[in-house]
Image: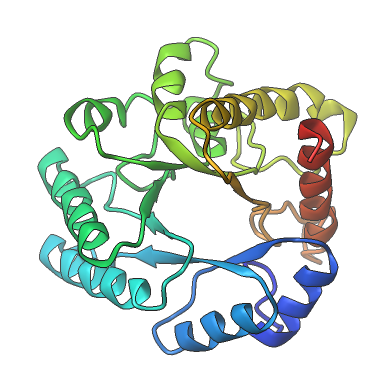
Amino acid sequence: MWGMETLSYAEAAKRVKQADYDGMEIAAGADKRKEAAQLMRDNGLELILMAFGGGANFAEHKKKYHDDLLDIASYKPLFINAHTGHDYFTFEQNAELIQLALDVQKQTGVRILHETHRGRFSYSAPAIQYYLLKIPELRLTADYSHWVNVAESYLADQIGNVNRAIAVSDHIHCRVGHPEGPQVNDPRAPEWKDALETHAKWWDAIRARLQKANASTLTVTCEFGPAGYLPTLPFTQQPVASQWDVNVFMKDYLKKRWQV
């Protein structure tokens, strides 16, 4: 839904259905979740909902995170994609939030995945390793574009770190990052061929792991963002590419790559 906020959920659902997507991932506020769930059902689309904590104060953040997870789970999305914790929270605090999510998952039966994202506990490939070691139940949404940006590299010197994340990544955000930003200006451009291939090989590895485990489904959200994330021209703020077209390209690119 990111970048389509000028559309109603009904209009957005119709547009993504016509473009041959299988569902939508939506960061819906508490007042919009019921509508989102109903419209996805009405249009035969799967729904992933997103959760966020709130506030720099840990106690406040934890309460909002817990309340949001319980409320979101009540709408029975395919799963919840969570932005969990902060990079400046302690390990113990972030681990407490992850355990809270595991408890809500057990209570509601709705899976909760934690997105690899700047500013969160999962902001870099090295930072997440201790969590993976200490919390073996931790499952991830793979958005490694953030890690490329944080490390200012394509992580060739962190193969072990990335592979340990791949082993527990169950959902993909197929955005392509580069060493100086979380999103290339247009993955169709020849200058980003190697960046696209580097990310695609990580996604291939996640898919291969799930196939080997006889998983029935792999979900991928085409998550190139709108102007702001998408570079713009100075003064006019004109985006240098079409967000919609780039995301449709990513969908078609992976379907062709994986022959699905």
The coloring applied to the image is rainbow
Q: Is residue 187 visible?
A: no
Q: Is residue 47 visible?
A: yes
As drawn, is 77 to the left or to the right of 184? left
When asked about the image quadrant of residue 54, the answer is bottom left
Q: Position of residue 144 (x, y in %)?
A: 53, 35
As drawn, is 199 to the left or to the right of 116? right
Residue in the image at 55% along x and 12% along y: 156
As drawn, is 153 to the left or to the right of 21? left
Q: Is residue 186 above or below residue 243?
A: above
Q: Which quadrant of the rendered structure holds the N terminus?
A: bottom right
Q: Which quadrant of the rendered structure holds the C terminus?
A: top right
Q: Position of residue 246 (x, y in %)?
A: 81, 51
Q: Position of residue 37 (x, y in %)?
A: 52, 80
When asked about the image quadrant of residue 127, the answer is top left
Residue in the image at 57% along x and 30% along y: 211
* Viewer-closest of 75 and 237: 75
Q: Position of residue 128 (x, y in %)?
A: 31, 31
* Viewer-closest of 212 and 219: 212
Q: Is residue 60 above or below residue 95?
A: below
Residue in the image at 36% along x and 74% along y: 72
* Viewer-closest of 54 and 173: 173
